[in-house]
Image: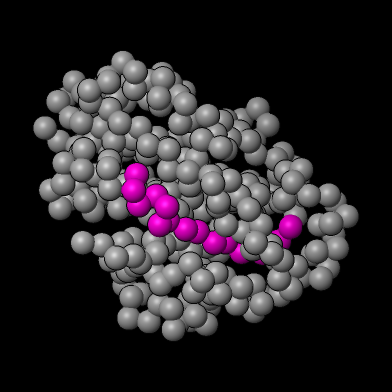
Amino acid sequence: MAIRIITDSASDISQEKAKEWGITVLPLKVSFGEKEYLDGVTLSPREFYEKLIETDEFPKTSQITPFTYAEEFGKAVKAGDEVLCFCLSSCVSGSYQSACIAAEEFPLSVSVIDTRQFCASEFIIVLRAVQMRDEGRTAKEIDAVIREELKDAHVIAVFNTLEYLKKGGRISSAAALAGNMLSIKPVLTIEEGIVEILGKARGSKKSNNMLTEFVKKKGPIDFDRPVCLAYSGFSNEVLYKYVEDSRDLYAGNELRMQETVAGATIGTYAGPGAIAVAFFTKRDRE
């Protein structure tokens, strides 16, 4: 009996990475006007950002259906596998509810976990489960440990522009114009399953300092558990400038950190040029 790990594309785990890890990533649907795509399958991150910049249509994402989950769960159970399904926060999507509905058909074989996170922080939770699976832990053990460790998972992000928050109706046009003129960059995290604005910094240096201070306040980082660096758009240059400026936090651990491109879930509102870091805080463990 094997352990089948299933998650959604809001985790920003690419299909290539999923194949490498031996997991399944179910795509959310992304729509630009009447045209619909499968996130990370028929629409790559690069293609997403090209459309985001070049078209007037603001993208919309839609949740994974109970049917899609049930189909995937059924294949796993038929193969004799146990399923651990990790969903993006139930506070921002109905995918978790869809998975729960589908799991009712397989009460002894499928466990559904609301990560209360998405993007880079969902990424590290899923990778933590992969680590434990590869260590030989049982599905029951992994489930219990993950639920306990969810409170250790944190993410902080810096958006480079307010433009896409404006387009998505999250802030007013006047606020976006004023903020962009002053080079205001919002600094955000996820608390209790939803995005919270920690503050607004003027310029890249101050925003990176705020990011670093948040990590120090929440930390120290547990490098024995996954750490993920994420960026939006076409280049990781800004991300690695931040890592270089914050080398006291990451020195000696660069090769242990994962990197990903933020997809449609957060990229819709971040636009290109955003960066994020997701990590588990260190704690005493037996």
- Which residue lies at the image location 61% right of the left edge and 73% below the top edge? 210
Along the line of sight, the residue nearer the viewer: 59 or 133: 133
Q: Which residue is the extreme one toward the top? A: 105
Q: Is residue 161 magenta?
A: yes
Image side of residue 50 versus residue 3, left or right: right
- Above or below for 159 versus 196: below
- Where residue 227 sits, quadrant-wise, is bottom left
> Which residue is depicted at the point 34% across and 48% down?
148
Judged from this view, the residue extending furthest toward the right is: 174
Q: Is residue 211 left or right of residue 243?
A: right
178 is within the stretch colored magenta: no
Q: Is residue 274 visible?
A: no
What quarter of the picture does the C terminus occupy? bottom left
Locate residue 96: give its quadrant: top left
Where 114 falls versus 100 (above or below)? below
Q: Position of residue 165 (x, y in %)?
A: 72, 50
Q: Position of residue 38 (x, y in %)?
A: 48, 34
In the rendered image, residue 187, in percent from the top left (x then y), is placed at 64, 63
Report whether 76 appears left or right of 187.
left
Picture colour scheme:
one colour
Instruction: Determine the image quadrant of residue 33.
Output: top right
Magenta segment range? 147-162
* Residue 81 in view, yes or no: yes
Write the residue at 65% across / 27% down: 34
Rendered residue at 57%/61% (across/down): 157
Screen quadrant of the N terminus: top left
Residue 253: x %, y % from top left: 33, 75
